Amino acid sequence: MSSCGLFDSGVEWRGGPYALLWIDTSDNISICRDLGNGSWIGRIDSTVFAVGWDGSYLVAKQHPDNDRGINNYFIIDARIDTDSADTAEVVVGPLTASEFQRKSNAMRLPGFSKVLASLE
């Protein structure tokens, strides 16, 4: 279990137990799950620049290691995610755009409601 320790940090978005959280710099932004009492567990590494949430699924777009030439897509199944769940069990991805689109259509995933234009 890894955690997102908070030094200089900020939250750009929240949905249920999840947050778009940056640590140290605003381009080091990832999806973390709030464990309470100031503790977090990482779910999708940086650089996440878009997110959507419908209460059952969280979707995210990421530039791995801030490489804006690469777009990865992720899905978190919040219905089975718990504070102690293994990330590999609840996070699907990285996916390509076409893989994500197929899953999105089949699963009726939410759209991207929060986009950080400065990181897009």
Image (cartoon, rainbow, N blue to C red):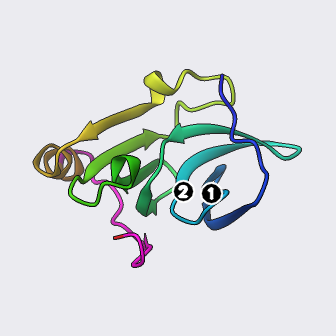
Q: Split into 4 quadrants, where in the image is the N terminus? A: top right
Query: Label 1's element?
Result: strand
**Residues tagged 1 and 2 counted as in contact (Cβ below 8 A):** yes
**Which numbered marker is on residue 29?**
2
Query: In the picture provided, is 27 more to the left or to the right than 112?
Result: right
Note whether residue 78 is visible.
Answer: no
Where in the figure is residue 72, as x and y percent of width and height?
27, 48
Residue name at image x 89 percent, y 44 percent? 37
Residue name at image x 36 percent, y 67 percent? 112
Query: In the picture provided, is 49 more to the left or to the right than 69?
Result: right
Residue name at image x 44 percent, y 23 percent? 88
Q: Which of pointers 1 and 2 lies earlier in the amino acid sequence? A: 1
Residue name at image x 47 percent, y 49 percent? 46
**Considering depth in this image, is 80 or 35 the residue closer to the camera?**
35
Q: Label 1: few (<14), some or many (≥20) within 10 Å?
A: many
Note whether residue 48 is visible.
Answer: yes
Query: Label 2's element?
Result: strand
> In this picture, which residue range is highlighted in magenta?
106-119
Whole-Å distance between the Cαs marked 1 and 2? 5 Å
**Which numbered marker is on residue 60?**
none
Q: Is 30 one of the magenta-colored residues?
A: no
Residue pointed to by mark 1 = 21
Q: Quadrant of residue 4?
A: top right
Where in the figure is residue 7, as x and y percent of width and height?
79, 52
Q: Split into 4 quadrants, where in the image is the C terminus? A: bottom left
Q: Amino acid at mark 2?
A: Ile
Q: Amino acid at mark 1?
A: Leu
